[in-house]
Image: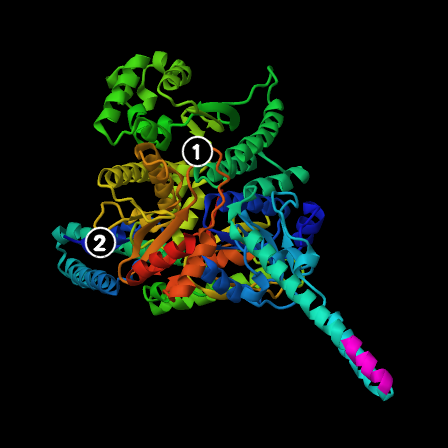
Amino acid sequence: MFISDIRKEFYEVVANQRVALLVSSDIDALCACKILQALFHCDQVQYTLVPVTGWQDLGTAFLEHKEQFRYFVLINCGANVDLLEMLQPDDDSIFFICDTHRPVDVVNVYNDTQIKLLIKQDDDLGVPSYDDIFRDEEDEGDDSGNESDGGSEPSGKRRRFDEGAVERRIERQRERREWEARRREILFDYEQYEYHGTSAAMMFFELAWVLTKDTKDMLWWAIIGLTDQWVHDKITHMKYVTDIATMQRHVSRHNHRNEDEENSLSIDCMRISFEYDLRLTLYQHWTLYESICNSCYTSCSFKLWTLNGQKKLQEFLADMGLPLKQVRQKFNSMDMTIKENLRDVIEESSNKYGMKDIRIQTFGVHFGFKNRFLASDMVHATAALLESTEKDESDSDNFIKALDSLSRSNLDRLHSGIELAKKKLIAIQQTVASCICTNLILSQGPFLYCYLMEGTPDVKLFSKPMALTLLCKYLLKAFVHSTRNKRCKLLPLIMAAPKDVEKGTVIVVGIPPESETSDKKNFFGRAFEKASESTSSRTLHDNFDTSIIELKTEDRSKFLDALITLLS
Amino acid sequence: MFCEKAIELIRELQRMSDGQLPAFNEDGLRQVLQEMEALYEQNQSDVNEAKSEGRAELIPSIKLRHCCLLRNQRCVTAYLYDRLLRIRALRWEYGSVLPPNIRFHMCAEELQWFGQYKKSLASFMRSLGGEEGLDITQDMKPPKSLYIEVRCLKDHGEFEIDDGTVILLKKNSQHFLPRWKCEQLIRQGVLEHVVS
């Protein structure tokens, strides 16, 4: 069931209890977890935090902890399947689920006792009404009762009753068949598309605000959670702008307290500010030139994998009057005169080159003399740490490192994350360039398909779901910009990359078609399930996002064929 | 040269200046004691000779040997005393059960001394704070909060806390637990205090 008052129905229930936190491995979940941990520290609620990477992990973690805990909080996992059937908990276990995955499974919505959803009821849900899906079984009982009563009547009347009863029964069965057909249709429509709702970090920040225990750190984490949804293309642009406006109100509320002229804050205090900043990834921690070359938006608009594109870039820089020597220097060492109006100068010039939205609304944080970060910088750094492919580092080690990097006291971890993120971005751009230049993207009819061979440089980076999804989106954008085929521009993209060489599996990701007004709804989850069933391929649907699966390399071709027939 | 072996003992302790206990250097100690015995024998014979034959030129060498004996004695007692101080600190750091690799470094007498120290500390603690006694080896620095956040560094299995609830300590899980229960495990290296 949906919770209406998050303070009374969630926080006050768990405040005196011990809680198990099961947290999924994405940045929004990490931020939400930090906010909740800070609240629990305030009120000394004992908890245990367990990172989970997929459904199997969730199952094992639950089994290990179900004896000791009654209350479970699931962050960014668990809403889109029938949780009670999957975990088979005892009757007194209670689950609080704060998940951005939609659609929320109908059993989770209508269960009143064990599942509490920390989701706003109007958060773009469209849940079918109860009567359309669940039906009481009492009608059957009445029917048979009538028949047995009819049997004790004398024979003449009995025949009349029997006929009436039989007719009624046929009528009822027909009605039931119709109802079931309607139910299947409603459920199919409801569960067909997968998308994302409001950030979990923002939900917990709102909880903190309602308790008036919100701090600037929590606000910053909520902003990072929201920016993660935007960077990884999980929400529409409209939703992002609306949520930014909500966050902006909180930011001004926090900043308003410190506007006093007499006691201005020390430079070491944390300041969050609204920025209408450039869409160049990590540009303040890199050189401007590298940032332009490796940001998806600019790279695709200029088509930097072609010679023409490189020339246009040089023209662009010359147009702005930025000398190459300056632009190839680290951003912090650029001349002050250039840095001052950089944003306006770039915006003007980029309008000439067809890049109308080079600037995006976002937030930046500033503490100490040296430390300035934009929200998207933090998202990229933490994502790179979370999915780092160093040897001997398990997923939970990476989770802990990424969680640490979000605290302000672990700046060296954050900087190492930024370096990893730079490497990842360069790898993505090079892979995109090589895929486009060697025409690795094939049109299979209803979708585009690309397979990364095993020997591709940096292919290990792309065995992780978030990195592969990012590569997928950049590749689709680049393809749309470079192809002349009008029909191909509207197709979705499926990408496969080797995941585990020893086990012989590949990771397959599907993303919706690229468009300005895309509503980011992804139908590949159901499609993959059906294709896998029909060809009995060996697949593992372990990720919380149903559009990311693991597949045995040998079954790749028959799986694809099944998908083609399914989707055409 | 005389007294060099005694200095070796002292240097050994100085190398481990952070309070670690090196192995009990029984050989070194025995050599120093043998040297002292040899010096003493020589001195005895020289003193007898000086007294009986009136040879005053032996007196400086007697004095020298005497000084060496005293120096050896000082060095040996310093060595033994410093080791005892370190062992005493171990009780405060590790608790009443020492890890086996440290016990290996102590000689039998030191172990006995440690046992007696434990006993007198325990009876002192019992005499404080009314009926139950007060464990003064906990909370060496004033704690900032009742509960601390800890991260598990290795799989430790199940762990029971005061109100009977059991927690599963699995690698890389984080917990928010009462401070006093965690201190032992933090010292053992199973948990790590997370400062955010």
Which chain does tag 1 point to?
A: A
User: For the point 59% across and 60% down, which residue is it?
Assistant: A184
* Cα gap from disc 2 to disc 1, whole angstroms: 61 Å
Q: On the rendered structure, is B120 left or right of A213?
A: left
Could you tell whether A451 is left or right of B193 in the image?
Answer: left
Residue at left offset 61%, top offset 66%: B164
Q: What SS does tag 2 mark? A: helix
Q: Are marks 2 and 1 on the same chain?
A: no
Residue A376, numbered circle: 1
In the rendering, at what x and y percent does residue A48 appear?
54, 56
Instruction: Tell which subunit mark 2 falls on.
Output: B
Give residue A404's quadrant in the image: top left
Q: Regarding mark 1 in the picture, which secondary structure is present there?
A: helix
Residue A156 percent location from the top left of the image: 86, 85
* Span colored in magenta: A156-165
Badge 2 local density, few (<14 within 10 Å), some, or many (20+)? Answer: some
Horizontal side of residue A522 vs A449, given as left or right: right
Q: Main secondary structure of the magenta part?
A: helix
Q: Residue at image x 51%, y 39%?
A: A519
Residue B52: image x %, image y %?
Answer: 16, 61
Answer whether residue A551 is visible to the viewer in this image: yes
